[in-house]
Image: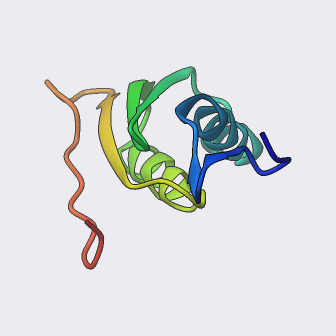
Amino acid sequence: MSPLGEQHGDSLDDEDLAQRVAQALRLDPEIGRHQLKLSVQNRVVILTGHVATARDSGMASQRAWSVPGVFDVCNRIGVAGHAGPVVWDWPGIG
């Protein structure tokens, strides 16, 4: 495996991609303070956990999308005071 985590052609393996997304989330001072979980399957990032505001949930999605190699982001993050996860529809993505 190369330093960029390339394994087969141009694709990153899911484990390496998960580490990169986790690092991007931790480095964001607004998002890093929340206890979020993530998994990656076939380059699709699945975010779970809880945050205080819908803005924080959206920022987590945006940070995950910013990582090269991410094919899609499924945001299942719960927001305090809401019955279920906030669903984000990012224009021009996906």
Q: Which sits in the foreground, 45 or 85?
A: 45
Report the front residue among 15 and 55.
15
Q: Quadrant of residue 5?
A: top right
Residue at 68 percent across and 47 percent down: it is: 24
Residue at the extreme bottom of the image, as rendered: 92
In the rendering, at what x and y percent does residue 90 appear? 28, 67
Q: Locate residue 74: give its quadrant.
A: top left
Q: Residue at x 60, y 57 (%)?
A: 67
Q: Please give the name of the residue rendered at 30% of the width and 71% of the height, measured from the top-left corner.
A: 93
- Looking at the picture, the colour scheme in use is rainbow
Compared with residue 49, is residue 59 higher up or lower down, i.e. above or below?
below
Residue 34 point in image, percent of width and height: 58, 27
- Residue 46 position, x and y percent, is 37, 33
Residue 92: quadrant of the picture: bottom left
- Tell which of 82 and 71 is nearer to you: 71
Q: How many marks?
A: 0
Q: Is residue 93 left or right of residue 61?
A: left
State left or right for residue 93 relative to residue 11: left
